[in-house]
Structures are given as structure tokens and as C-alpha cells.
Amino acid sequence: MFKPVGAIIGNRRFGKSSDAVLALGVRRVAQEVINGLDLPDKVRATIKVKTFKNGVLTISCSPLIAAELYMRSEELKKGINERVGGDLVKGLIFKNI
């Protein structure tokens, strides 16, 4: 009678809100991948995934952390795309807080 949420999100064909739901899913997965990096807890707490639009993921963090994440950007994109199930994330932008 009821469909699991994962089945609905995986379908990606449910009206105008599909892009927004996809963006939320990518942002959630990206935050999980970032939290899985070998960084101190205080550092991970300051990294926030802000937006996902047109294949570009925007991450807010301090300049020093941005430099570290930039060096790992290919690893991040690969990890996110593997978990999302496609080549959705094409680029990363790091904004300073």
C-alpha cells in the first residue's frame, strides 16, 4: 500500500520537485562522505554542504580546510558519485565562512 521513501527518491519522476529532492539527497550523501574523512571532529563540525545545482556542489568551510578539501576534491567527487549512483557531481566550490 505504501511505498518506501527510497523507492520514491530512486524513481526521480515525481513532478517539479524532483530536482529539489535530488539536491537534498546529494547534499546528505556529501555530508556523510565528508564526515567519513579522517579529520578531527572539531574540523568536521565546521564543514557544511550548502547547495547542489547544475552538477556543482557548494561547500562552506574555513580557508585552511578549503585547501585541504580541494586537494581531496577528486576523492570527494568519486565517493559522492559512487554513493548516489551516477555521475551527478561534476564540480566542487569551496566558500569561506
Image: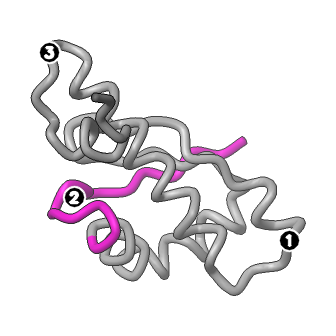
Three-letter amino acid code of the residue under disc 2: Lys
In the picture, the quarter occupied by the C terminus is top right
**Residue 25 highlighted magenta (yes or no):** no
- Residue ID for mark 2: 90
Q: What secondary structure is marked by label 2?
A: loop
Residue 81 percent across, percent down from the top left: 27, 67
What is the C-alpha distance between the residues marked 1 and 3? 39 Å
- Residue ID for mark 3: 15
Q: What secondary structure is marked by label 3?
A: loop
- Residue ID for mark 1: 41
* Residue numbers of the magenta segment: 82-97
Q: What secondary structure is marked by label 1?
A: helix
What is the C-alpha distance between the residues marked 2 and 3? 24 Å
- Residue at the (35%, 41%) spot, across then down: 4
**Residue 95 highlighted magenta (yes or no):** yes
Three-letter amino acid code of the residue under disc 3: Gly
